[in-house]
Amino acid sequence: MSHHLPDIRIPAPCIVNTGIIVNKLDIRRLLADLGRVHYIYTHEEKLLSEGEGDVMEVFANPQRSTLIANHALYLNVCSFDYLELKQSAEQETCLDLMQEGMCLRLIPRSTPLQERRERSLNVSAIEAMMEQVLSARWDAEIDDDCSDSF
């Protein structure tokens, strides 16, 4: 006797501003666009730490830790069971990373678009500086070549 289940495809969730995300890839995608954040670290609603910092790296590795020090955040999505996305009373986006009574709340201080613009400006500035350095080096080499001929 064979039991066949109907081939029903369940659509992927659509989460808009509020919801719970358990998929590590989705969590990583949300966190990867963060730049400057205000963080609040609590255990069973008791404040343990609070501050501001920049998200430097987001990764998934069960052998590595999430680290927050010196205003830098290195976030390992494997450190958390799920992410709860919500809006504060002040209409700020809150990303609550949850793990057994512990909550690392991240409140973005910039938008992904602002972060992309700043990265683009940084890349443009570096490219301009490199162009100046190479140009100065070539000028110096040409000057050296000219002085050798006398």
Image (spheres, rainbow, N blue to C red):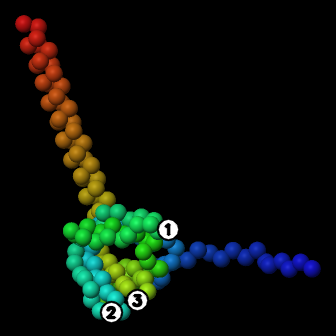
Q: State the image coordinates of residue 51 (x, y, percent, origin top left).
A: 22, 78
- Evaluate whether residue 18 shows in this view: no
Q: Earlier in the sequence, mark 3 or mark 1?
A: 1
> Which quadrant of the figure has residue 85?
bottom left
Between the C-alphas of marks 3 and 2, the distance is 8 Å
What label sits on residue 45 in the rendered view? 2
Residue 78 vertical position relative to residue 44 in the rendered view, above or below? above
Q: State the image coordinates of residue 127 (x, y, percent, origin top left).
A: 24, 42
Q: Which residue is mark 1?
A: 25
> Which quadrant of the figure has residue 3?
bottom right
Left/right placement of residue 146 relative to residue 124 reads left
Residue positioned 28% across, 56% down in the render: 119
Density class for disc 3 (Cα within 10 Å; few <14, some 14-19, many ≥20) is: few
Image quarter where the N terminus lies is bottom right
In this orientation, which residue lies closer to the viewer: 30 or 73? 73
Instruction: Mark 3 vs mark 1: give the one in front.
Output: 3
In this orientation, which residue lies closer to the viewer: 115 or 28? 28
- Evaluate whether residue 47 shows in this view: yes
Q: Earlier in the sequence, mark 1 or mark 2?
A: 1
Between the C-alphas of marks 1 and 2, the distance is 27 Å
Q: Please, which residue is most extreme toward the top here?
A: 150
Q: The residue tagged with tag 3: helix, strand or loop? A: loop
Amino acid type indicated by mark 1: Leu
Q: The residue tagged with tag 2: helix, strand or loop? A: loop
Q: Which residue is mark 3?
A: 101
Q: Earlier in the sequence, mark 3 or mark 2?
A: 2
Amino acid type indicated by mark 3: Gly
